[in-house]
Protein backbone atom coordinates (compact mmCIF):
# COMPACT_ATOMS: atom_id res chain seq x y z
CA UNK A 1 0.00 0.00 0.00
CA UNK A 2 2.81 2.34 0.86
CA UNK A 3 4.28 2.15 -2.65
CA UNK A 4 0.90 2.68 -4.25
CA UNK A 5 0.30 5.85 -2.24
CA UNK A 6 3.60 7.29 -3.34
CA UNK A 7 2.75 6.42 -6.91
CA UNK A 8 -0.65 8.13 -6.69
CA UNK A 9 0.88 11.19 -5.11
CA UNK A 10 3.44 11.34 -7.90
CA UNK A 11 0.69 11.06 -10.49
CA UNK A 12 -1.25 13.88 -8.81
CA UNK A 13 1.88 16.01 -8.81
CA UNK A 14 2.27 15.43 -12.54
CA UNK A 15 -1.36 16.33 -13.14
CA UNK A 16 -1.02 19.49 -11.07
CA UNK A 17 2.20 20.44 -12.80
CA UNK A 18 0.74 19.96 -16.25
CA UNK A 19 -2.50 21.81 -15.62
CA UNK A 20 -1.36 24.71 -13.44
CA UNK A 21 0.38 26.88 -16.08
CA UNK A 22 -2.51 26.62 -18.52
CA UNK A 23 -5.02 27.73 -15.85
CA UNK A 24 -3.05 30.87 -14.90
CA UNK A 25 -2.01 32.14 -18.33
CA UNK A 26 -4.67 31.65 -20.97
CA UNK A 27 -3.53 33.31 -24.16
CA UNK A 28 -5.65 36.09 -25.59
CA UNK A 29 -8.24 35.18 -28.18
CA UNK A 30 -10.38 37.31 -30.51
CA UNK A 31 -13.39 36.70 -28.27
CA UNK A 32 -11.62 38.46 -25.38
CA UNK A 33 -11.77 41.84 -27.18
CA UNK A 34 -14.69 44.26 -27.21
CA UNK A 35 -14.95 47.33 -29.43
CA UNK A 36 -18.35 48.41 -28.14
CA UNK A 37 -17.53 49.47 -24.59
CA UNK A 38 -17.54 53.00 -23.11
CA UNK A 39 -14.30 53.50 -25.05
CA UNK A 40 -15.02 51.83 -28.36
CA UNK A 41 -14.35 51.87 -32.08
CA UNK A 42 -17.45 51.53 -34.21
CA UNK A 43 -17.13 48.96 -36.98
CA UNK A 44 -13.65 47.74 -36.03
CA UNK A 45 -12.81 44.11 -36.81
CA UNK A 46 -10.09 41.97 -35.25
CA UNK A 47 -8.23 38.86 -36.29
CA UNK A 48 -5.57 36.81 -34.58
CA UNK A 49 -2.27 36.65 -36.40
CA UNK A 50 -0.05 35.01 -33.76
CA UNK A 51 0.51 34.36 -30.07
CA UNK A 52 -1.06 37.38 -28.28
CA UNK A 53 -0.72 39.18 -31.62
CA UNK A 54 -3.75 40.66 -33.36
CA UNK A 55 -4.65 42.85 -36.31
CA UNK A 56 -7.42 45.44 -35.94
CA UNK A 57 -8.99 46.97 -39.03
CA UNK A 58 -10.60 50.30 -38.23
CA UNK A 59 -13.77 51.69 -39.70
CA UNK A 60 -14.48 55.38 -40.20
CA UNK A 61 -16.57 58.25 -38.86
CA UNK A 62 -20.15 58.62 -40.17
CA UNK A 63 -20.13 60.10 -43.69
CA UNK A 64 -16.33 60.56 -43.52
CA UNK A 65 -14.68 57.59 -45.26
CA UNK A 66 -11.18 59.00 -44.78
CA UNK A 67 -11.51 59.77 -41.07
CA UNK A 68 -10.51 56.70 -39.09
CA UNK A 69 -12.23 55.87 -35.85
CA UNK A 70 -9.76 55.75 -32.99
CA UNK A 71 -8.41 52.31 -32.04
CA UNK A 72 -10.21 52.04 -28.71
CA UNK A 73 -11.14 48.71 -27.17
CA UNK A 74 -11.29 46.72 -23.99
CA UNK A 75 -10.11 43.27 -23.08
CA UNK A 76 -12.84 41.64 -21.04
CA UNK A 77 -10.95 38.58 -19.74
CA UNK A 78 -7.67 36.66 -19.81
CA UNK A 79 -5.35 39.66 -20.06
CA UNK A 80 -3.32 39.01 -16.91
CA UNK A 81 0.25 37.97 -17.62
CA UNK A 82 -0.10 38.46 -21.36
CA UNK A 83 1.88 40.96 -23.39
CA UNK A 84 -0.09 42.17 -26.40
CA UNK A 85 1.01 43.11 -29.88
CA UNK A 86 -1.79 45.05 -31.57
CA UNK A 87 -1.34 45.91 -35.22
CA UNK A 88 -3.84 48.52 -36.42
CA UNK A 89 -4.74 49.31 -40.00
CA UNK A 90 -7.00 51.75 -41.79
CA UNK A 91 -7.52 50.93 -45.43
CA UNK A 92 -8.50 54.36 -46.80
CA UNK A 93 -6.13 55.53 -49.56
CA UNK A 94 -6.15 59.10 -48.25
CA UNK A 95 -6.51 59.01 -44.49
CA UNK A 96 -7.20 62.35 -42.86
CA UNK A 97 -7.10 62.89 -39.08
CA UNK A 98 -4.99 59.85 -38.39
CA UNK A 99 -5.70 57.18 -35.79
CA UNK A 100 -2.02 57.31 -34.83
CA UNK A 101 -1.46 61.07 -34.63
CA UNK A 102 -1.45 60.84 -30.84
CA UNK A 103 -0.37 58.48 -28.10
CA UNK A 104 -2.86 56.10 -26.51
CA UNK A 105 -3.20 54.93 -22.92
CA UNK A 106 -4.27 51.75 -21.18
CA UNK A 107 -5.65 51.02 -17.76
CA UNK A 108 -6.45 47.91 -15.81
CA UNK A 109 -8.53 49.77 -13.21
CA UNK A 110 -10.33 52.40 -15.30
CA UNK A 111 -8.69 55.39 -13.63
CA UNK A 112 -4.90 55.11 -13.64
CA UNK A 113 -3.72 55.40 -17.22
CA UNK A 114 -0.34 54.44 -18.62
CA UNK A 115 0.74 55.80 -22.01
CA UNK A 116 1.46 53.48 -24.91
CA UNK A 117 3.24 54.92 -27.93
CA UNK A 118 3.04 53.82 -31.55
CA UNK A 119 5.99 51.79 -32.78
CA UNK A 120 6.27 53.88 -35.96
CA UNK A 121 5.88 57.61 -36.36
CA UNK A 122 2.44 58.76 -37.53
CA UNK A 123 1.39 56.77 -40.55
CA UNK A 124 -2.41 56.68 -40.79
CA UNK A 125 -2.57 53.32 -42.54
CA UNK A 126 -0.68 50.83 -40.40
CA UNK A 127 0.94 50.99 -37.01
CA UNK A 128 1.56 48.88 -33.93
CA UNK A 129 1.02 49.16 -30.19
CA UNK A 130 3.11 46.91 -27.92
CA UNK A 131 1.81 46.37 -24.40
CA UNK A 132 3.89 44.88 -21.59
CA UNK A 133 2.31 41.96 -19.67
CA UNK A 134 -0.95 43.15 -18.08
CA UNK A 135 -1.34 42.96 -14.30
CA UNK A 136 -5.08 42.21 -14.38
CA UNK A 137 -7.47 40.29 -16.57
CA UNK A 138 -9.41 43.31 -17.85
CA UNK A 139 -7.90 46.25 -19.73
CA UNK A 140 -9.20 49.42 -21.37
CA UNK A 141 -7.32 51.11 -24.22
CA UNK A 142 -8.16 54.59 -25.47
CA UNK A 143 -7.01 57.72 -27.25
CA UNK A 144 -4.67 60.20 -25.46
CA UNK A 145 -5.52 60.09 -21.73
CA UNK A 146 -8.99 58.76 -22.44
CA UNK A 147 -12.30 59.98 -21.10
CA UNK A 148 -15.40 57.92 -21.75
CA UNK A 149 -18.78 59.58 -21.57
CA UNK A 150 -19.41 57.49 -18.47
CA UNK A 151 -16.35 59.08 -16.85
CA UNK A 152 -17.48 62.55 -17.93
CA UNK A 153 -20.87 61.95 -16.32
CA UNK A 154 -19.24 60.76 -13.10
CA UNK A 155 -17.08 63.90 -13.00
CA UNK A 156 -20.07 66.17 -13.58
CA UNK A 157 -22.07 64.28 -10.94
CA UNK A 158 -19.23 64.85 -8.48
CA UNK A 159 -19.04 68.57 -9.28
CA UNK A 160 -22.81 68.90 -8.90
CA UNK A 161 -22.42 68.23 -5.17
CA UNK A 162 -20.67 71.59 -4.78
CA UNK A 163 -22.78 74.57 -3.69
CA UNK A 164 -21.05 76.57 -6.44
CA UNK A 165 -22.19 74.34 -9.31
CA UNK A 166 -25.39 74.24 -11.30
CA UNK A 167 -25.58 71.57 -13.99
CA UNK A 168 -27.85 72.68 -16.81
CA UNK A 169 -29.13 70.21 -19.39
CA UNK A 170 -29.38 72.27 -22.57
CA UNK A 171 -30.43 69.40 -24.82
CA UNK A 172 -29.79 65.80 -25.77
CA UNK A 173 -27.38 64.21 -28.22
CA UNK A 174 -28.68 63.00 -31.54
CA UNK A 175 -27.79 59.31 -31.38
CA UNK A 176 -27.79 58.23 -27.76
CA UNK A 177 -30.11 60.91 -26.36
CA UNK A 178 -27.29 61.61 -23.95
CA UNK A 179 -27.65 64.81 -21.90
CA UNK A 180 -25.79 67.84 -23.22
CA UNK A 181 -24.66 69.42 -19.99
CA UNK A 182 -23.44 72.93 -19.41
CA UNK A 183 -21.88 73.32 -15.99
CA UNK A 184 -22.20 76.74 -14.38
CA UNK A 185 -19.75 77.65 -11.63
CA UNK A 186 -20.05 80.74 -9.49
CA UNK A 187 -20.68 81.79 -5.90
CA UNK A 188 -24.30 82.91 -5.77
CA UNK A 189 -23.74 84.34 -2.29
CA UNK A 190 -20.98 86.63 -3.55
CA UNK A 191 -21.44 90.33 -2.69
CA UNK A 192 -21.07 91.15 -6.41
CA UNK A 193 -24.25 90.96 -8.50
CA UNK A 194 -24.10 88.31 -11.20
CA UNK A 195 -24.71 90.95 -13.85
CA UNK A 196 -21.42 92.64 -12.94
CA UNK A 197 -19.20 89.55 -13.00
CA UNK A 198 -16.84 88.42 -15.70
CA UNK A 199 -18.22 85.45 -17.65
CA UNK A 200 -15.87 82.85 -19.09
CA UNK A 201 -17.07 79.94 -21.20
CA UNK A 202 -14.77 76.94 -21.60
CA UNK A 203 -15.69 74.23 -24.07
CA UNK A 204 -14.44 71.10 -25.77
CA UNK A 205 -15.48 70.63 -29.38
CA UNK A 206 -13.57 67.58 -30.64
CA UNK A 207 -14.76 64.60 -28.62
CA UNK A 208 -11.61 62.51 -29.10
CA UNK A 209 -9.30 65.26 -27.84
CA UNK A 210 -9.33 63.88 -24.36
CA UNK A 211 -6.26 65.73 -23.13
CA UNK A 212 -8.23 68.92 -23.70
CA UNK A 213 -11.07 67.49 -21.61
CA UNK A 214 -8.70 66.70 -18.74
CA UNK A 215 -7.36 70.27 -19.04
CA UNK A 216 -10.93 71.47 -18.48
CA UNK A 217 -11.23 69.14 -15.48
CA UNK A 218 -8.12 70.78 -14.02
CA UNK A 219 -9.78 74.19 -14.44
CA UNK A 220 -12.97 73.06 -12.73
CA UNK A 221 -11.18 71.38 -9.85
CA UNK A 222 -9.21 74.57 -9.18
CA UNK A 223 -12.36 76.70 -9.37
CA UNK A 224 -14.06 74.48 -6.81
CA UNK A 225 -11.05 74.46 -4.47
CA UNK A 226 -10.33 76.98 -1.72
CA UNK A 227 -7.99 78.75 -4.13
CA UNK A 228 -10.89 79.42 -6.49
CA UNK A 229 -12.85 81.50 -3.98
CA UNK A 230 -12.00 84.90 -5.48
CA UNK A 231 -12.64 83.63 -9.02
CA UNK A 232 -16.06 82.29 -7.99
CA UNK A 233 -17.03 85.59 -6.38
CA UNK A 234 -16.06 87.85 -9.28
CA UNK A 235 -16.81 85.58 -12.22
CA UNK A 236 -19.19 83.05 -13.71
CA UNK A 237 -17.80 80.07 -15.56
CA UNK A 238 -19.66 77.92 -18.07
CA UNK A 239 -18.18 74.55 -18.96
CA UNK A 240 -18.93 72.06 -21.72
CA UNK A 241 -16.78 69.03 -21.02
CA UNK A 242 -17.84 67.01 -24.07
CA UNK A 243 -19.79 68.56 -26.94
CA UNK A 244 -20.40 65.23 -28.70
CA UNK A 245 -21.07 62.68 -25.94
CA UNK A 246 -22.06 59.97 -28.42
CA UNK A 247 -18.47 59.85 -29.66
CA UNK A 248 -16.20 58.06 -27.14
CA UNK A 249 -18.03 54.73 -27.40
CA UNK A 250 -17.73 54.94 -31.19
CA UNK A 251 -14.13 56.13 -31.40
CA UNK A 252 -15.18 59.27 -33.29
CA UNK A 253 -12.37 61.77 -33.08
CA UNK A 254 -14.04 64.97 -34.30
CA UNK A 255 -17.68 64.36 -35.12
CA UNK A 256 -21.24 63.75 -33.98
CA UNK A 257 -23.59 61.11 -35.39
CA UNK A 258 -24.09 63.22 -38.52
CA UNK A 259 -20.37 63.04 -39.23
CA UNK A 260 -19.99 66.80 -38.88
CA UNK A 261 -16.71 68.11 -37.54
CA UNK A 262 -17.72 69.68 -34.24
CA UNK A 263 -15.27 72.54 -34.69
CA UNK A 264 -16.57 73.29 -38.19
CA UNK A 265 -20.14 73.63 -37.08
CA UNK A 266 -20.61 77.19 -35.81
CA UNK A 267 -23.01 79.40 -37.75
CA UNK A 268 -21.82 82.94 -37.36
CA UNK A 269 -25.09 84.30 -38.76
CA UNK A 270 -26.96 82.60 -35.95
CA UNK A 271 -27.86 79.14 -34.66
CA UNK A 272 -30.09 77.28 -37.12
CA UNK A 273 -31.74 73.98 -36.26
CA UNK A 274 -32.46 73.19 -39.90
CA UNK A 275 -28.94 73.48 -41.25
CA UNK A 276 -26.59 73.07 -38.30
CA UNK A 277 -25.11 69.91 -36.76
CA UNK A 278 -27.44 69.01 -33.94
CA UNK A 279 -25.24 69.30 -30.83
CA UNK A 280 -23.60 72.42 -32.21
CA UNK A 281 -26.97 74.03 -32.80
CA UNK A 282 -28.09 73.25 -29.26
CA UNK A 283 -24.96 74.73 -27.77
CA UNK A 284 -24.83 77.82 -29.99
CA UNK A 285 -28.51 78.56 -29.32
CA UNK A 286 -27.83 78.35 -25.58
CA UNK A 287 -24.79 80.66 -26.03
CA UNK A 288 -26.93 83.16 -27.92
CA UNK A 289 -29.46 83.11 -25.07
CA UNK A 290 -26.62 83.76 -22.65
CA UNK A 291 -25.36 86.67 -24.76
CA UNK A 292 -28.84 88.22 -24.62
CA UNK A 293 -29.04 87.81 -20.83
CA UNK A 294 -27.63 90.13 -18.15
CA UNK A 295 -24.60 87.82 -17.83
CA UNK A 296 -23.14 87.86 -21.35
CA UNK A 297 -19.98 85.87 -22.03
CA UNK A 298 -16.70 87.81 -21.94
CA UNK A 299 -14.38 85.07 -23.22
CA UNK A 300 -14.82 81.79 -25.04
CA UNK A 301 -12.03 79.23 -24.59
CA UNK A 302 -12.03 76.39 -27.14
CA UNK A 303 -10.09 73.47 -25.72
CA UNK A 304 -8.33 71.29 -28.29
CA UNK A 305 -5.23 69.16 -28.69
CA UNK A 306 -2.45 69.34 -31.20
CA UNK A 307 1.26 68.55 -31.32
CA UNK A 308 3.65 69.83 -28.67
CA UNK A 309 2.90 71.32 -25.29
CA UNK A 310 -0.28 73.33 -24.65
CA UNK A 311 -0.56 76.23 -27.11
CA UNK A 312 -3.04 79.05 -26.40
CA UNK A 313 -3.87 81.39 -29.27
CA UNK A 314 -6.14 84.43 -29.10
CA UNK A 315 -8.27 84.34 -32.28
CA UNK A 316 -10.08 87.54 -31.45
CA UNK A 317 -9.53 90.01 -28.63
CA UNK A 318 -12.59 91.58 -27.04
CA UNK A 319 -12.96 95.20 -25.91
CA UNK A 320 -11.64 94.50 -22.41
CA UNK A 321 -8.08 94.39 -23.74
CA UNK A 322 -6.21 97.66 -23.93
CA UNK A 323 -7.23 100.56 -21.68
CA UNK A 324 -9.51 98.44 -19.49
CA UNK A 325 -7.31 95.49 -18.46
CA UNK A 326 -4.08 95.98 -20.37
CA UNK A 327 -2.63 94.51 -23.56
CA UNK A 328 -2.99 90.82 -24.41
CA UNK A 329 0.72 90.42 -23.71
CA UNK A 330 -0.08 90.99 -20.04
CA UNK A 331 -2.26 87.87 -20.03
CA UNK A 332 0.58 86.01 -21.77
CA UNK A 333 3.05 87.06 -19.10
CA UNK A 334 0.71 86.16 -16.24
CA UNK A 335 0.25 82.64 -17.62
CA UNK A 336 3.99 82.28 -18.24
CA UNK A 337 4.77 83.20 -14.63
CA UNK A 338 2.31 80.60 -13.34
CA UNK A 339 3.54 77.89 -15.73
CA UNK A 340 6.48 76.75 -13.62
CA UNK A 341 6.63 73.28 -15.21
CA UNK A 342 6.62 74.71 -18.76
CA UNK A 343 3.50 72.91 -19.90
CA UNK A 344 2.22 75.87 -21.94
CA UNK A 345 3.70 77.88 -24.82
CA UNK A 346 3.54 81.66 -24.52
CA UNK A 347 0.11 82.94 -25.51
CA UNK A 348 -0.04 84.20 -29.11
CA UNK A 349 -2.35 86.51 -31.02
CA UNK A 350 -3.53 85.20 -34.39
CA UNK A 351 -6.70 87.04 -35.30
CA UNK A 352 -9.64 85.40 -37.04
CA UNK A 353 -9.50 85.44 -40.83
CA UNK A 354 -12.90 84.46 -42.12
CA UNK A 355 -13.03 81.23 -40.14
CA UNK A 356 -16.69 81.51 -39.41
CA UNK A 357 -17.42 77.83 -38.76
CA UNK A 358 -14.87 77.48 -35.97
CA UNK A 359 -16.03 77.47 -32.38
CA UNK A 360 -12.47 78.50 -31.61
CA UNK A 361 -12.90 81.78 -33.50
CA UNK A 362 -16.48 82.49 -34.56
CA UNK A 363 -17.84 83.59 -31.16
CA UNK A 364 -15.58 86.59 -31.71
CA UNK A 365 -16.97 87.10 -35.22
CA UNK A 366 -20.57 86.84 -34.02
CA UNK A 367 -20.38 88.79 -30.76
CA UNK A 368 -17.04 90.62 -30.69
CA UNK A 369 -16.07 88.73 -27.52
CA UNK A 370 -12.65 87.31 -26.85
CA UNK A 371 -12.13 83.90 -28.44
CA UNK A 372 -9.13 81.79 -27.49
CA UNK A 373 -8.09 78.53 -29.12
CA UNK A 374 -6.04 76.28 -26.86
CA UNK A 375 -4.18 73.60 -28.80
CA UNK A 376 -1.29 71.26 -27.98
CA UNK A 377 -0.67 68.70 -25.22
CA UNK A 378 0.20 65.76 -27.49
CA UNK A 379 3.34 65.34 -25.37
CA UNK A 380 1.47 65.45 -22.07
CA UNK A 381 1.13 61.69 -21.58
CA UNK A 382 0.03 61.96 -17.97
CA UNK A 383 -3.44 62.99 -16.79
CA UNK A 384 -1.82 65.12 -14.09
CA UNK A 385 0.03 67.25 -16.66
CA UNK A 386 -3.24 68.07 -18.38
CA UNK A 387 -4.93 68.86 -15.08
CA UNK A 388 -2.03 71.15 -14.18
CA UNK A 389 -2.16 72.97 -17.52
CA UNK A 390 -5.83 73.66 -16.81
CA UNK A 391 -5.08 74.94 -13.33
CA UNK A 392 -2.44 77.30 -14.71
CA UNK A 393 -4.76 78.67 -17.41
CA UNK A 394 -7.69 79.27 -15.07
CA UNK A 395 -5.45 81.02 -12.55
CA UNK A 396 -4.09 83.17 -15.37
CA UNK A 397 -7.60 84.07 -16.48
CA UNK A 398 -8.58 84.94 -12.92
CA UNK A 399 -5.53 87.17 -12.40
CA UNK A 400 -5.83 89.02 -15.70
CA UNK A 401 -9.58 89.55 -15.39
CA UNK A 402 -9.25 91.64 -12.25
CA UNK A 403 -12.11 93.41 -10.54
CA UNK A 404 -15.51 93.08 -12.19
CA UNK A 405 -16.84 93.18 -15.75
CA UNK A 406 -19.07 96.10 -14.80
CA UNK A 407 -17.38 98.25 -12.15
ZN1 LIG B 1 -9.54 69.99 -32.03
Image (cartoon, rainbow, N blue to C red):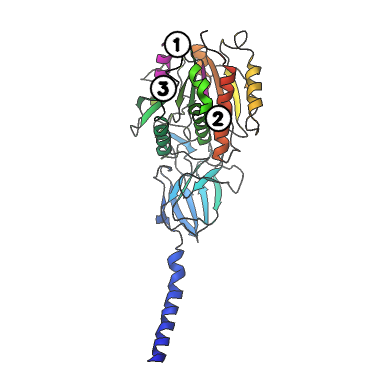
- Which residue bears the numbered disc 1? 195
Q: What is the count of numbered marks? A: 3
Image height of 140 relative to 198, above or below? below
Pointer 3 or 1: first along the chain: 1
For the point 55% across and 25% down, which residue is it?
394
Which element carries disc 3, helix, strand or loop?
helix
Please tell me in which quadrant of the rendered image residue 186 appears: top left
User: Residue 53 vs residue 323: left or right?
Assistant: left
Task: Measuring from the top left, give residue 123's x and y in whole percent.
Answer: 58, 43
Q: In whole angstroms, how far apart are the C-alphas of marks 3 and 1? A: 21 Å
Question: Is the C-beta separation of discs 3 and 1 under 8 Å?
Answer: no
Which element carries disc 1, helix, strand or loop?
helix
Task: Measuring from the top left, give residue 382's x and y in whole percent.
Answer: 56, 41
Task: Measuring from the top left, give residue 103's x and y in whole percent.
Answer: 56, 42
Numbered disc in front, either 1 or 2: 1
Crowd around label 1: few <14 · some 14–19 · many ≥20 (10 Å): some
Q: Nearer the viewer, residue 22 or 398?
A: 398
> Residue 206 colored magenta?
no
Numbered disc in front, either 3 or 1: 1
Residue stretch rendered in magenta on the structure: 282-303
Which label number is shown at residue 390? 2
- Which residue bears the numbered disc 3? 283
Image height of 63 relative to 396, above or below? below
Question: Is the C-beta separation of discs 1 and 2 under 8 Å?
Answer: no
Please tell me in which quadrant of the rendered image residue 308 appears: top right
Amino acid sequence: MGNLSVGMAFALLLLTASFAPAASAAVLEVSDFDFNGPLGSEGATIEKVGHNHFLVTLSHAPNQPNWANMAQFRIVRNAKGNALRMDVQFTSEKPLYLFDDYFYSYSTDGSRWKPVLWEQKRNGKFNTLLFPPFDRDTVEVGHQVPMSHRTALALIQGWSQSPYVKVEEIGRSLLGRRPLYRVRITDDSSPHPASKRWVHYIGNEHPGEHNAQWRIVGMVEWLLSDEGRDARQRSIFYITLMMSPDAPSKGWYRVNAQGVDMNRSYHVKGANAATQAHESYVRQKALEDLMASDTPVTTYWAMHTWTGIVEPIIRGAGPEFGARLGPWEKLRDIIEALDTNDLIKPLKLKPVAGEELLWSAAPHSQFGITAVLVEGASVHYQKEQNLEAGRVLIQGITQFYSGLRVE
